[in-house]
Image (cartoon, rainbow, N blue to C red):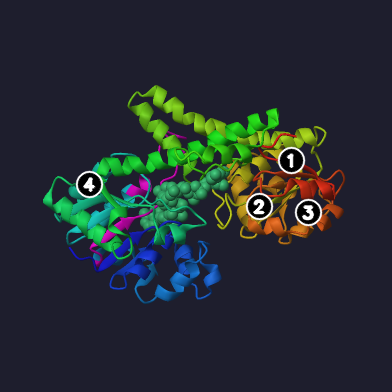
Amino acid sequence: MKIKNICCIGAGYVGGPTMAVIAKKCPSINVTVVDINQDRIDAWNDSDLSKLPVFEPGLDKIVEETRGKNLFFSTDIDKAINDAEMIFISVNTPTKTYGKGKGMAADLKYIELCARQIAKVAKEDKIVVEKSTLPVRTASAIKSILDNTGNGVQFQILSNPEFLAEGTAVQDLLNPDRVLIGGDNASEAGKKAIQSLVDVYANWVPNDKILTTNVWSSELSKLTANAFLAQRVSSINAMSELCEKTGADVNEVAKAIGMDSRIGPKFLKASVGFGGSCFQKDILNLVYIAKTYGLNEVADYWEQVIVMNDHQKNRFSDNIVKTLYNTVSGKKITFLGWAFKKDTNDTRESAAIKVADNLLNEQAYVVAYDPKVSEEKMYADLEYLNTRSSEENRELLTAEDNPYQACKGAHAIAVLTEWDEFKTYDWKKIYDSMNKPAFLFDGRGILDKNTLEKIGFVYYKIGVGA
Ligand code: NAD
Ligand code: UGA
């Protein structure tokens, strides 16, 4: 089947950028991204491109090129479903906050709502593509809903997980390491559906990078990829603590092991802990799935990745308190960075949130600066934890939009995100404006120890022994 119209349900961090790139690379396909969130759709349609709801380097240009030509953002979900031969489901799949599997399993209610809506609206055969990250075997639930509540039309379900990383989404989409498509490769109709999606990607992705598998392998590969990636970060973070105790330097260790071609150099940067909307949620989901099959050792093994990550965040804030003579009460601690990584405005599960929460518990006064995150977003992140009242959060934390102002009078600075601009600051000027001794806790290992110590800072770098 030649695809002429694509609908994507969910205009978030995945749906928006992914569909923008499909629209750019497939000028003959009309792509409509729909969402129930009117504000989000309005922001995608804003003529001021700086107001797009997702900040990603290069995304604004692609949206400018394609929007209104073959890329559309709308809240008319039924129409978009009806018009499309292929429908991507790209809605959120957060960790369940209630009932069975609370705190672990993926909440599939948004996925089910999409399936029911597609079933209700579709008057012709459709290919439904799982773009969201889902537990293995979700496709059979979607198929059951579609077949049992639909209008007698045929549905083919494909799994096409997304591997983009935020901050590099556009580059990842333009030059993916691979595109994974799982489908029913045992039936003719299934094979045709797989081929239709292969043909979409073949507009710009080399054939040898388009991998087709059965549905279950595709669904499980996505969870596995995130688990392996997160495990690497937890592994190097575990070594960072040992480095600090022994006088080794985790950056040197990472370089030394990364030169082994079997290990490789990427994803070995020690940090204050991984964040982002997916690593924790997807590992918890994997742990839950393993437990439901009675695979307790498998579950425990992967759970340790999260245990280590929580420990890394907590030991970072503990170290700040301990170093500042065991009390931060009433002291000004400046955060440089709030986003979970550089080049994104996304703060979901950012280590900064937990570190701030811990320090606020110690009655510190936190002033945060992030080039892309608003003060209201920071308050919303803290409120989500429910540790203290909204009023207290607003008393104890403020945001500054000027980093020099943020650091003025601080007892300590903590680097929580690896934004490039932090490296180019006038650190002498910052030092002069601070309380002494001026402490600097580099949770991303991005600053130069010698330069800062020469200026006079008491400098702590994650994973580097004193
Ligand atoms: P998001 O929260 O940014 O976006 C999801 C959107 O879906 C929201 O705008 C929400 O309003 C909308 N939505 C929910 N239910 C809907 C419904 N019934 N009808 C219409 N719209 C609906 O989420 P995201 O970060 O884009 O992630 C989406 C999925 O992709 C998740 O499963 C996630 O695990 C996966 N994923 C995310 C990333 C990433 O970098 N963020 C990368 C790869 C995979
Ligand atoms: C991650 C994966 O890299 C993507 O392939 C996947 O599609 C995505 O999750 C998803 O499923 O949502 P993302 O979370 O956007 O992408 O960003 P990463 O670059 O993976 O970083 C995740 C976290 O790990 C960040 O907090 C980052 O700072 C941290 N990290 C990463 C480290 O601390 N050290 C590293 O060496 C690498």
**Which class describes the residues within 10 Å of circle 1: few (<14), some (14-19), or many (20+)?**
many
* Tag 2 secondary structure: loop
The residue where tag 1 is placed is: 460
Residue type highlighted by circle 4: Lys
Q: Is residue 404 above or below residue 107?
A: below
Residue closer to the observer: 176 or 378: 176
Q: Residue at x 25, y 67 (%)?
A: 83
Q: Amino acid at mark 1?
A: Tyr
Q: CA distance from mark 1 to mark 2?
A: 17 Å
Residue on which the image places disc 3? 407
Q: Earlier in the sequence, mark 4 or mark 2?
A: 4
Alpha-carbon span between mark 1 and mark 4: 53 Å
Q: Which amino acid type corresponds to the residue marked 2 in the rendered image?
A: Gly
Task: Please say if the residues under marks 4 and 3 sit with CB atoms less than 8 Å apart.
Answer: no
Q: Secondary structure at mark 4?
A: helix
Q: Secondary structure at mark 1?
A: strand
From this view, report whether residue 427 is shown above or below residue 463: below
Q: Residue at x 79, y 55 (%)?
A: 427
Looking at the rendered structure, the secondary structure element under dot 3 is: helix
Residue tagged by mark 2? 337
Q: Which residue is mark 4?
A: 143
Q: Which residues are magenta?
A: 83-111
